[in-house]
Amino acid sequence: MKRIALILMIALLPLAGCDKLDNNSVSGKAPGGQNSQGGQPGGGEEGGDDKPVTQPSGAIKEWTQDLWVDRTLSPGMYQYMVSKYQVTYDSKGRIARIDESDTYYKEGGGQDGDVRHSSIYYVYGNGTLELRFPSNSEKDTKSRCVLNSDGNVVTIENGYMDGSSWKVSGTTKYSYQSLGSDTKEIYLSKVEYPVSSGKRYPFEFTWSSNTTVSRIVESDPRSMQDPEEDETRNYFYTEKDNPLFGSPLDLATYAVVSSVIGGGYPLPLGSGIKKLVSYANTTYRNEAEKFTWEWNSGNTRLEHIRIDQKLFPEDSSVKNSRQINYWPEYYD
């Protein structure tokens, strides 16, 4: 409840169906596009990479994401926002840049302001990864990441440059484990994120032997004091394998865990989830999240990921659902 209360207060556009929104739904184009780094920071080792970017076969080149919310005081579902993401990869097949354009909507229809463009540049060094968020301000925000020997993020230090000084606003820590004899597959076991008190409240992952996460436990004391706030999830799976497992951008795993651990952008956080999730339960919500996976005609690629979420306990007096859709497009 604490994470979505603000969203429910926002007036949204009436739902006219859940078909994929075409590109005209988001006016303008993210700067740079997916085939040019435009001389901006990002890609390659520290100092930039002037080699041509790659187009990894089967990798996601862009995706559209839209959000619908059922509000208490209005009939039906309302569309809140549509986001378009374009992905650039460096010459080593790693994510070098993600360009994002966001369109917000207001009650009664129509856009709520201009399309908002932003970019994240991934700059790789020796055991480090720096995320840069360019702006017109002198205080450009950044995230400094430390990588382990497997290339997974161990810490993310968020902050900004104030002149020549680095100001830290918070640090998130990540822990990993290996399952079975295949040491190449490293799985996320704990995420510790900072809160205003300076303490860290972790999410802890429990994995089953077939490399699917069976439970994500929230250890925030606030959830322990009020069970209705507990975001601990128990996962149940389909028989389908995740076709994006091990790819540079595993959108299927991202869709499952990002809303729980607060991940705002794709990062190398372990090997991902091998099976596709059917639904997740919490203490007070059966099927708190229900996942629908739609495939192409050859049953080889995911074309649509839909998440239906229950935001409050079953006995809540308010409308308690929202829907998130992901529409990926791939390189051949």
Image (cartoon, rainbow, N blue to C red):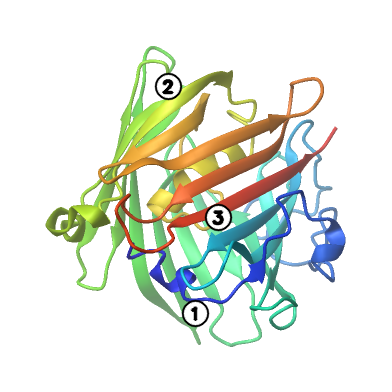
Q: Residue furthest top?
A: 181
Indicate left or right for 23 with 267 as reference: right
Q: Secondary structure at mark 1?
A: strand
Q: How many marks?
A: 3
Residue identified by numbered label 3:
265
Q: Secondary structure at mark 2?
A: loop
From the top left corner, tell me how far across and down residue 36 is, in percent: 84, 58
Give the quarter of the figure containing the N terminus. Answer: bottom left
Look at label 1 and name its amino acid.
Answer: Met
Residue identified by numbered label 1:
161
From the top left corner, tell me how far across and down residue 130 is, in percent: 54, 59
Q: Secondary structure at mark 3?
A: loop
How far is mark 2 from mark 1, CA to CA? 40 Å
Residue identified by numbered label 2:
211
Q: Is residue 271 visible?
A: no
Q: Is residue 58 visible?
A: yes
User: Against 74, is 214 above or below?
Assistant: above
Q: Which is more N-terminal, label 3 or label 1?
A: 1
| Residue 321 vs residue 167, the one in the foreground | 321
Mark 1 against mark 3, which lies toward the viewer? 3
Look at label 2 and name its amino acid.
Answer: Thr
